[in-house]
Amino acid sequence: MQIKTLLNRVQKYRGFVYGSARFQERSGGLALEVDIYPHRRNGPRCSGCGRRGPQYDRLEPRRFEFVPLWYMMRRVDCAPCGGVHVERVP
């Protein structure tokens, strides 16, 4: 069974899809790193008000420790909040 299949069954993030998976050597030992991308139909949500808005740009990938995932955060040009914010992620 593939790692992406296991992740989709165990840790499904609605609106996102898993990309490539790889093992990386870290100071604490071996780590599994998986890329995660937004689904094409999934527009970014403002982290301030939670409303959808047009994508402004993407930030550098970030590493999350719970399940090590690489994801380039999108920024949202949010009209109700009056500014550009990093998108809300699960």
Image (tube, helix red, strand yellow):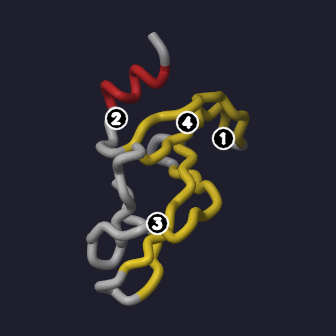
Residue 52 at x, y percent in the picture: 30, 67
In front of the other: 41 or 45: 41
Q: CA distance from mark 4 to mark 2?
A: 12 Å
Say which label, 4 or 2, has the lower sequence index: 2
In front of the other: 38 or 60: 38
- Residue 28 numbered tag: 1
Say which label, 1 or 4, has the lower sequence index: 1
Residue 60 at x, y percent in the picture: 64, 60
- Residue 83 numbered tag: none
Say which label, 3 or 2, has the lower sequence index: 2
Q: CA distance from mark 1 to mark 4?
A: 18 Å
- Tag 4 near tag 3, CB within 8 Å: no
* Amino acid at dot 2: Gln
Q: Which residue is mark 2?
A: 11
The mark closer to the camera, 1 or 3, is 3
- Tag 1 near tag 2, CB within 8 Å: no
Q: Which residue is at 31% across, 25% downward?
A: 9
- Residue 34 numbered tag: 4
Residue 88 position by quadrant: bottom left
**Local secondary structure at mark 2:** loop
Relative vertical location of residue 85 with respect to residue 68 in this rendering, above or below: below
The mark closer to the camera, 4 or 3, is 3
* Amino acid at dot 3: Gln
Say which label, 1 or 3, has the lower sequence index: 1
Q: Which residue is mark 3?
A: 55
* Amino acid at dot 4: Val
